[in-house]
Amino acid sequence: MRTSAMYRAQQALGARFRDDAGWKVADVYTSPDDEVARARAGVGLSDLSACGKLGVQGEAIEALVTKLTGRPAPEVGAASRERVNGAPLLIAHLAADELLVLTAPGDHEIVADLVAKTADTLGCVHVTDLSAAFAVVDLVGSRVGALLERLVPIDLSALPALGLVQAELARVHAVILRADHPRLPAYRVLVPREYGDFVWRTLMDAGHDLGLTPVGAAAHARLGAEA
Amino acid sequence: MSRLPAHPAQRIDRSRPVSFTFAGRSYEGFAGDTVGSALYAAGVRVFSRSFKYHRPRGLLCCRGHCPNCLVNVDAVPNVRACVEPLRDGQRVTPQHAWPSLEHDALAVIDRLHFLFPVGFYYKTFIHPKRLWPTYERVLRACAGLGRITFPGEPAGDYERAHLFADIAVVGGGAAGMAAALEAATAGLGVVLVDDQPELGGRWRFRVTPAADAGHAGDDIVREMAAAVAADGRIRVLDEATAFGLYEDGLLGVLQRNRFVTLRVRQVIVATGALEYPMVFENNDLPGVMLGGAAQRLQGLYGVRPGQGAVVVTNDDRGVEVALELRAAGVVIAALADARAGADSAGIASLHDGGTTIMRGATALAARGSGRVTSVVLGGLDGRVVSEMKCDLVALATGFEPAAGLVGHAGGKLRVGDGGRLTPGALPARVLVAGEVMGLGELDAILASGRLAGAEATLALSGAGSRLSARVSQLRDELARRRSHVEHRPASIAPGRAAKRFVCLCEDVTEKDCQQAVAEGFDHIETLKRYTTVTMGPCQGKMCHRLSIDVCASLTGRTVEETGTTTSRPPAQPVPLGALAARFADPWKLTPMHHQHVEAGAELMDMGAWKRPLAYARPSDRQRAVDDECRAVHEAVGLIDVSTLGKLEIVGRDAAAFLDWLHPNRFSDLGAGRVRYRVMCDDAGIILDDGVVARLDADRFLLTTATGTIDAVEQWFTWWLAGGRRCAHVVNLTGALAAINVAGPRSRELLQGLGDVDVSASALPYLGARTGHMAGVPTTILRIGFVGELGFEIHFPADYGEYLWATLMAAGAPLGVRAFGVEAQRVLRLEKAHVIVAQDTDALTTPFGANLGALVKLDKPDFVGRDVLASVAGRPLTERLVGFELEGTTVPAEGAAVVDNGHAVGRVTSAKWSAWLGRVIGLAWVPVARAHDGATFDVRMNGTVAGARVALRPFYDPDGARLRS
């Protein structure tokens, strides 16, 4: 089984785990109802490291997105939600020649194969599996802005929906994506895997007085589905 | 208790008593008190001892500016009691006094002041020379203020925040609030920074009706504060000090225990005026207090500042202070007004109430032991007129703009009419409002605030007819309301006594300044540096203007000719703990980290990584290292090498790119093969080493040293930038975990665990294969750093815990053992393998490090080729060699290689090898000694030990075991 960089920290918090596409995923800490309520009032912290991650580099990456999705690539510094062969994707345009594609854990292999085959038709475009390269967390809740202003030295309030920046979070290089839930502000944060344990514990510490609570996969799904 | 009747301006809650201790004694105050106000109300007058002479000091400013009330609060040193909120159970202790604050033995220095002239450390304690160590020890013991928190004691807990806004208004007084409200009305985001717990500035305790419609200042600012609180576009940072203004609108702010970086587009400085004392004999005695301080004590905390007071002034502010003190029941014995023709209704009222009015007079000296009991008053020519009994001397003699932040941004103070200082041309993005501009009347202050808010809005919103008209209207209003401010005489009373203090922080007297000027330090900047005036905890708030006046007086220059000192951040002392606030020290963990901890590993820091040094407690380390080495030699060992840097180089030009960056060649490396790499810079100096594995035609996996990955990735990316090569670099350091399986039984362990055939024929030395190991996708490199048969397994980090546990379990019957960095260091040294940056330095080329064979000068070009080609034929002066040392003492890395007592080289690595039974190492030695069997000495701990050169590896010199 695969475990994320925050697995041990979650174990220490009493998480109950379930298997998801070969991963041990923290499902519940207290109860989904309790976690949802706490996240709404404060900040919910979820580990999404099990998602698939593909790095794509090359000058023709915009053509690759168009070929894959039939739509233009998002602007540099933005992301778009797409669906390819039924699999939901989040395509983040990090730089003029660099994309990061996030998939659901179970869709990773299918999407990776499709992206690689499409890239092969476009000359000097290369795809690397970065699924193990990043620890990924979602921060969702009414007080998430107050939490991030403690840790991030740039102004995230100006970030539009699905806008992204690369900045320091607690002095760790991070990709920070504005990914609001239907009724709550939210950010998705990717940091190098080796910093995952540090970042998780730092978020727990920094958000303590803001009502930060770990949120398992069950509650996270419910927050995302709220309308 | 000297509490006054309740008043709406007071911020204490008399229904909530608060208990605390000071110097071991119990006291009681009220919620809303500061430590200083509660102690003063309880009759405490001495709060601290001065820095140099250990003179008793009491409340002076009550605003958190001066050094007089520095105390230790709950183990935090140098806290200003006058602004520190009172909390139940607080433990307040005096500092810088022994054995007690009241009876400080070091106060004897005050009587021996002739031994401590300015710059005394260059003068009086230098003879006889042999006693200097003793002097130094004593002086060091006496120097400094407060005691830092040591391990084991409660530490300060500081947080960090990053805020952004359109406009920052610094100063929450009348001008600041007016500016914030004006800007917010235009829809801009404003952060209002104020160093007090409530907005309003000094107007909070001004109960005298102000010019504006006859309302008292405290009523007006209370209404404004409510408007600010109700405006969602204004964010208030209370109890927050903006200590620095830096480039691009960056403000450093300390808010209680929170270090805030505030980035804005416009800054409005509305920090008001600094009230400073005047110079006269014994002007530091407890009971000598600034007029504003007396007003604060009674206005905010309901504390009567004294029973009988003398007020010393040179303008109407002093009259106002006297009237307010009298209203609080203080007997005003005298008003000494420097103005010969001073007259007003207030003065008449004081006179009618029995106060002696002395025009053209000032304070010449304060008298008393430990506190003021009388003050000598006289004319401005120094003639003594009378000595008045009192327990309070209230000074309303000097104000200067609090323009430190303007100075940080590059602004200068301008000397105006009568020597008044005001900010000159303002730097970009900076505006000023209120008393910092030299304004005094509330109407004008409010108008200046509104104008600054409108100007900031105009600057950010672009020219618009409505905004421009608003700015013009407010400019007119300010011009209409701005009144003439009369000239103040310099705040230096005539006199020649020794203890006339200019700088209370550093105990610098007027006489010290006189001596400094006589010694040639007659420029205000050199006077500052020599005497340290303005360089203490108050950062010039009490003495900046006084030092200028004193310098001007001593040199016969005008204030304009004298100039001002430069204001630099921080404007207010900032605890180092705040700057190093939490979350400042990230760590990196490998996927197997927690398993190492569970196995009892002693961890070490390697950059940000935590790595197992050895699997034992520190006290058992050597035995554990010996055992770990033996396991690798005899059976099989596992080491977590996930910290190695790992890059994927991919693209049809990847091989050519690697050829370009390295002296050796990779374009001829076959798929499934591994080659050692050494990389040099343009000057041919070794930067890094590792291996390159060719996984297929255009995909390579490259490893670097743990500490060099960031620099190597940057180097690769730099050389790719703007080029036409089809190659990309991906940093996979964290993505791939890595385990080195080493030892004669390592093949036995791996064979059958997966679908990769690891037999010698299928996977020979320097081979690379991809496949699955225990179901985990892996890349296996047949290499060895530790001298035994070895396999380096790279795999997705998320499988780290699983694969480590699987290998340990599978290897148990074979005697597998985890080994740490220390054992690895011993094992690599037995093979004389080099560690770049430890065994090499910033001058090492591959030729000196015995790696010359890797330099392929037949390649047409590569980075560093020209230099390497030119040095290839030159004789070397020194070489890196292996050595064996007599005895069992291990020399430190860096130990000198000596020849006839002269250092001729250095040891770069040395370890005790239990397997070989001797100390071995690597050292740079003169080339004449770089041959097998040559001898040299190594100096360590004052002795020397003989060493013998060994050019071949100490263990398995032919590499038979490695290649098996």
Image: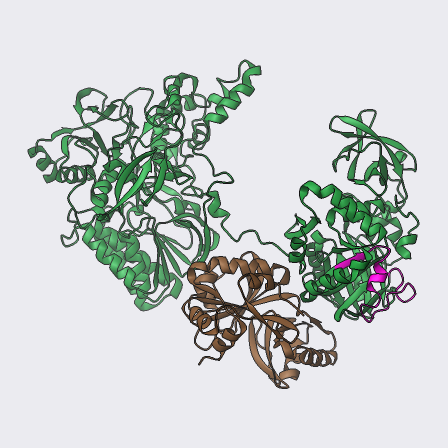
In the rendered image of the structure, the colour used to display chain B is green
Instruction: Specify the principal SS of the magenta part.
Output: loop
Residue that extends furthest to the front in the rendered view of this protein: B813
Q: Residue at x 92, y 53 (%)?
A: B960
Quick one: which chain is brown? A
Q: Position of residue B746 (x, y in %)?
A: 83, 59
Q: Is residue B775 magenta?
A: no
Residue lying at 68% horizontally and 50% vertically, measured from the top left: B601
Judged left or right of residue B546, residue A174 is: right
Count of numbered marks? 0
In which image quadrant can residue B918 be found? top right
- The quarter of the picture where the C terminus of chain A appears is bottom left
Q: Position of residue B850 (x, y in %)?
A: 86, 46
Residue A209 found in image quarter: bottom left
Q: Is residue B211 visible?
A: yes
Q: Is residue B757 above or below residue B30?
A: below
Residue B877 seen in render: no
Provide the residue span drawn in magenta: B739-766
